[in-house]
Image (tube, rainbow, N blue to C red):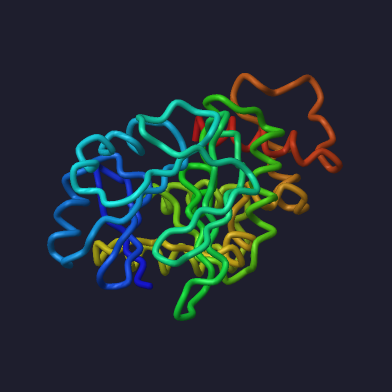
Amino acid sequence: MKLEAIAAFSDNYIWLLHDGHDALVVDPGDAAPVLLALKARGLRLAGILVTHHHADHVGGLDALRPHLDGPVYGPAFETIPQPCLPCEAGDVVELLGQRFSVIDVPGHTSGHIAFFLEQPSGGGAPILFCGDTLFSGGCGRLFEGTPAQMHASLQRLAALPGNTRVCCAHEYTLSNLRFAQAIEPANQALSDYVAWCEGQRRQLLPTLPSSIALERQVNPFLRCTEPAVIEAVTAKLPAGLQPPTAPDYSGDAVAVLAALRQWKNQF
């Protein structure tokens, strides 16, 4: 199975997974780059996976349907352009001979899901299509969910095997890493990753996929119990949120995540 990132809009990625003949795409916000990629590779579109309802993830569905020889799968508790087969936690989706486990990851939106392929046929590391929940070095904004939901969702993803390929839906990595360095300036793994990502972008190459193991090392939203992250949040809360006395975050990872997310919104 070959995994490719198709660039769309200014910073979206539509993920393409194929075996040289049949393909699926994930979160096709725009049909045009998908159709170009399929034609260039001589692929049949056999299925579509959707993680959440935002337009930059579903906007290309209707234009792709005449070219689609298979189903669309999407979150059961969100409004997705129909027809779409509803999925929720515990479901297994079968496409291209692959078995994708569905994981509920609310936070960015209330019904956001992710698709996890633990054993790609022909070998290779596991694959996670996580939409806008987990980004490399960051997480999605809380448009509909709560900090507690997002924390639980991120912990669910962080528990996946370390070699899992993290296929996020946006090229936000360097922006996220600048924020991460403000939180943990002494994190050497983070500094090394920044240098690598800068090299990728200079060559106009994606920084993705990342890996779960790497995200555990560099992503502050997965490191809410780390002393350095707690210290940073305690020392500098976002503008307008500074209480008379900084709270003790040491036993409250959800509060740390909430503070980080507010800080990142204004960073």
* Identity of the residue drawn at 62% across and 19% down: 240
Foreground of the two, 114 or 99: 99
User: How many numbered discs, if any?
Assistant: 0
* Residue 5 image point, x, y percent: 32, 59
Q: Quadrant location of residue 149? A: top right
Foreground of the two, 57 or 67: 67
The reply, left or right, for residue 132 in relation to residue 155 is left
* Identity of the residue drawn at 35% across and 71% down: 2
* Residue 129 image point, x, y percent: 48, 54
The reply, left or right, for residue 108 in relation to residue 9 is right
Image quadrant occupied by the N terminus: bottom left
* Identity of the residue drawn at 30% across and 45% down: 11
* Residue 19 image point, x, y percent: 32, 72
Name, please, the residue furthest toward the bottom: 122
Foreground of the two, 253 or 145: 145
Q: Can you say whether 114 is above or below 58 in the image?
A: below
* Residue 191 image point, x, y percent: 52, 65
* Identity of the residue drawn at 24% across and 62% down: 204
Q: Can you say whether 79 is above or below 74 in the image?
A: above
Q: Can you say whether 77 is above or below 11 in the image?
A: above
The reply, left or right, for residue 218 in relation to residue 176 is right
